[in-house]
Image: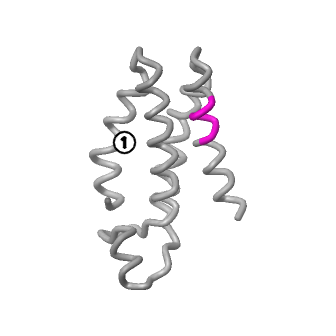
Amino acid sequence: MTIPVINDSVLPILAKLVDDAIPNIKFNVAKSYSALIDVLKKLPDNTETISTLEKSGKSASGSERGDQMIRESILPSLDKLIADDDIDVRYFASVAAKSYGDVMQT
């Protein structure tokens, strides 16, 4: 996936699911956010995908736009999930949010 696809198609769907009544949906949203954080930290701000980067041997250094999407779209949703009543939702949301901090420190 590219940054525009994630921004225009994936994030709006996940944002709606954050408020779902079913805890299993919400903790899977948190897991999805965790995977997206990993991808967005690597994707350049163009039409390249992780797969095309790996095939070409280019390094995946990420972009300001990807980082901005994490900060403005994903982290606020994770904050909401961290405050959820369900312990599993809180756990997976915390793990996802921490993965952003871990990536930033390395």
Q: Does dot 1 land on a helix, a strand or a loop?
A: helix
As drawn, is 91 to the left or to the right of 40?
right
Q: How is the image coloured?
A: one colour
Q: Residue at x 47, y 43 (%)?
A: 33
Closer-to-camera residue (66/84) = 84
Q: Quadrant of residue 82?
A: top right
Mark 1 lies on residue: 11
Main SS of the magenta segment? helix
The quadrant of the rendering that contains the N terminus is: bottom left
Residue 86 % position (x, y): 57, 17
Q: Is 31 left or right of 101, judged from the image as shown? A: left
Quarter of the image for residue 93 reads top right
Whether 79 is among the magenta residues is no
- The reply to whether residue 73 is in sight is no
The amino acid pointed to by label 1 is: Leu
Residue 65 in the image: above or below residue 87: below
Instruction: Quadrant for the C terminus, please.
Output: bottom right
| Relative to 43, residue 20 above or below | above
Horizontal side of 104 relative to 38 (left or right) equals right
Q: Is residue 92 magenta?
A: yes
Q: Write down the quadrant of residue 104 in the picture.
A: bottom right
Q: Position of residue 63 (x, y in %)?
A: 48, 66
Q: Which residues are magenta?
A: 91-95
- How busy is the neighbourhood of tag 1: few (under 14 within 10 Å), some, or many (20 plus)? some
Q: Residue furthest bottom?
A: 57
At x 28%, y 47%, the residue is 8
Q: Is residue 105 visible?
A: yes
Query: In the image shown, does 54 or 42 lie closer to the viewer?
Result: 54
